[in-house]
């Protein structure tokens, strides 16, 4: 079941967010949001100047490749020698990352989520968009995020042919239900039992009310900002409201018998692909109710019903693999051929380091 395409949703997205200053929507983000007219229709596009850095990684590669990478070193606590080596490499690479000039950027198809969904442009269309952007922003890098080598393999080739450089970002996990449904693994069957006896009542998008928005932002924050890192997008209730009321994010809540929402998942769907940019739960209840397991299996069930490719993003790698998710490397595509020589040189060095060292580490340690 295909979801609406990006072009039919873009004006609603821009209009919903255009009335409020960006920090009122995403507290740690500074960016300008506009619509880009393309051969197929409008797309949301963010614009950032280097002076805006550092800001949230969804609009700032220096944060994504330096600050966020440093946060990920928590995964190497049991390997102090390797962690120390990586800390040194990240420290040495910071000037190179800033020197690429990618923080001075326009980013088409940026929906302000950790994962965007590729919108299927042909080579000729991508070249036309690139030419238009170069004329409008002659001193600015052009960046497209969230392209992976499983679902977007053809798109990566298109970007290469159009003169873009590809920067590995992270390893993600995909649950592909578009054709043959994956067999239900034992862990999935066990999760289904947890969901069935979890004691929480499911409420769909039609039952989400304005009084839920602050709670949804709180539940998301408990997981992504408090448990993981404050570098993640700090979504505010106003952003949750806008995404729900426009139907761009399909929110599902799980409430206790008193009606208090204790877990939430929100789906963002385009074409044959779905993601879950909003996930959260009450951390105090997690150990007893296994709320994360309930949310993950609920998402997998929805992917199966809709026959979609479920991009489960990064993290919890062993957990997702054991349930049948497939690993893929995610890339950002950057056009920098028009930038000064020193920026292009820094980009080549960083691209080489990420491809030669970063990707093997991502695969080896399932980052």
Image (cartoon, rainbow, N blue to C red):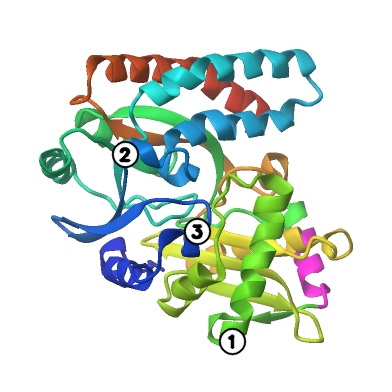
The magenta stretch spans which residues? 189-199
Q: Is residue 254 above or below residue 125?
A: below
Residue 193 drawn in magenta: yes
Q: Is residue 264 above or below residue 345?
A: below
For the view shown, which residue lies furthest in the right direction? 288
Question: Mark 2 or mark 1: which comes first in sequence?
Answer: 2
Q: CA distance from mark 2 to mark 1?
A: 37 Å
Circle 3 Cα neighbour tier, 10 Å, few/some/many (<14 / 14–19 / ≥20): many
Observer able to see residue 272: yes
Circle 1 Cα neighbour tier, 10 Å, few/some/many (<14 / 14–19 / ≥20): few
Q: CA distance from mark 3 to mark 2?
A: 20 Å
Q: Nearer the viewer, mark 3 or mark 1?
A: 3
Residue 106 x/y as whole percent: 28, 43
Circle 2 Cα neighbour tier, 10 Å, few/some/many (<14 / 14–19 / ≥20): many
Image point (48%, 64%), residue name: 25
Image point (68%, 56%), residue name: 184
The local secondary structure at tag 3 comes to: loop
Image point (53%, 28%), residue name: 66
Residue 264 x/y as whole percent: 65, 69
Question: Mark 3 or mark 1: which comes first in sequence?
Answer: 3
Give left or right: position of 163 versus 86: left
Q: Which mark is residue 207?
A: 1
Question: Mark 3 or mark 2: which comes first in sequence?
Answer: 3
**Quadrant in the rendering for residue 123:** top left
Q: Is residue 299 above or below residue 118?
A: below
The local secondary structure at tag 2 comes to: strand
Circle 2 residue? 143
The local secondary structure at tag 1 comes to: helix
260 vs 305, nearest the viewer: 260
Circle 3 residue? 26
């Amino acid at each position: 079941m295909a979801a609406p395409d990006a072009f039919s949703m873009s004006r609603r997205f821009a209009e919903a967010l255009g009335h409020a200053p960006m920090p009122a929507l995403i507290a740690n983000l500074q960016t300008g949001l506009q619509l880009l007219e393309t051969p197929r229709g409008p797309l949301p596009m963010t614009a950032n100047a280097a002076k805006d850095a550092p800001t949230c990684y969804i609009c700032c590669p220096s944060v994504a490749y330096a600050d966020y990478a440093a946060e990920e070193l928590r995964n190497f606590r049991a390997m102090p020698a390797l962690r120390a080596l990586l800390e040194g490499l990240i420290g040495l690479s910071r000037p190179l990352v800033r020197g690429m000039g990618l923080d001075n950027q326009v980013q088409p198809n940026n929906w302000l989520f950790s994962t965007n969904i590729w919108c299927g442009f042909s080579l000729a269309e991508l070249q036309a968009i690139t030419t238009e952007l170069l004329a409008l922003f002659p001193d600015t890098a052009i960046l497209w995020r969230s392209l992976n080598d499983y679902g977007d393999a053809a798109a990566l080739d298109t970007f290469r042919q159009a003169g873009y450089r590809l920067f590995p970002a992270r390893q993600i996990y995909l649950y592909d239900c578009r054709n043959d449904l994956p067999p239900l693994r034992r862990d999935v069957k066990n999760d289904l039992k947890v969901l069935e006896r979890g004691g929480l009542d499911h409420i769909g998008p039609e039952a989400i009310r304005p009084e839920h928005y602050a709670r949804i932002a709180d539940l998301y924050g408990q997981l992504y900002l408090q448990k993981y890192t404050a570098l993640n997008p700090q979504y505010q209730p106003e952003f949750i409201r806008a995404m729900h009321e426009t139907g761009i994010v399909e929110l599902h809540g799980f409430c206790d018998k008193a009606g208090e929402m204790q877990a939430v998942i929100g789906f963002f769907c385009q074409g044959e692909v779905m993601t879950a940019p909003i996930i959260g739960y009450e951390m105090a209840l997690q150990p007893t109710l296994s709320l994360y397991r309930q949310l993950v299996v609920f998402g997998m069930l929805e992917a199966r019903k809709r026959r979609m490719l479920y991009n489960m993003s990064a993290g919890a790698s062993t957990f997702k693999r054991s349930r049948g998710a497939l690993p893929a490397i995610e890339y950002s595509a950057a056009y920098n051929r028009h930038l000064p020589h020193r920026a292009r040189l820094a980009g080549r060095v960083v691209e080489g380091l990420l491809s030669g060292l970063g990707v093997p580490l991502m695969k080896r340690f399932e980052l």
